[in-house]
Image (cartoon, rainbow, N blue to C red):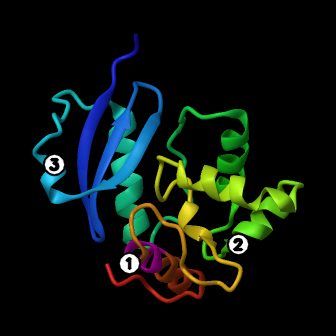
Amino acid sequence: METKYTQIYYSPIGIIKIVASDSCIEELVFIEEAEVLKIEQSENIPPIIHQCTDELIEYFAGKRKSFSVPIHQEGTEFQQRVWKELYEVPFGKNLSYGELAKKMGNYNAVRAVAAANGKNKIAIIVPCHRIVGADKSLVGYAWGKTRKKWLLQHEFRLALGVQSLF
């Protein structure tokens, strides 16, 4: 059985729990302050977590628009397809759930696409925050609309060439 490592990263928009193996990031989720005390952080942090935190720092500083850290999350074949499509949504852009379903070849799968999007456990890197409602409203973000709005505004500013606030 492969060793799992856990580290906490304090981002400008909240606390992030990072879980990794020696070879890839398996989870990157926002958590609340009360949860931090319940998490046993790993003493020996593998290079993959250092790479991930460095890339997050660069992202929040407005110096990174894509991630190179290896990732993997368990899921069904359909979920994997959705997450792959999410990963391909360009920085500073967004799609509706319907547009994402259509891109995958089945507009009628909107609800299934939305459900798979909601099961994503690698926030920011697999940019589920870039998926919005058909009317472009901020819907369906597991870690709160305030964070989703911040992430989208951060990316839109940078895509327009406006420097980040951090």
As drawn, is 110 to the left or to the right of 8? right
As drawn, is 7 to the left or to the right of 74? left
Residues at circles 1 and 2 in contact by the CB criterion of under 8 Å: no
The secondary structure type at the circle numbered 2 is strand
Above-or-below relation of 68 to 96: above
What amino acid does circle 1 point to? Thr
Real-space Cα separation, disc 1 to disc 2, in angstroms? 18 Å
What amino acid does circle 2 point to? Leu
- The structure residue drawn at horizontal position 56% and vertical position 60%, both measured from the top left corner, is 127
Above-or-below relation of 31 to 24: below
The residue beneath circle 2 is 95
The secondary structure type at the circle numbered 1 is helix
The residue beneath circle 3 is 36
Q: Residue furthest top?
A: 1
Q: Which residues are magenta?
A: 146-151
Residue 52: horizontal and vertical position, in percent?
39, 46
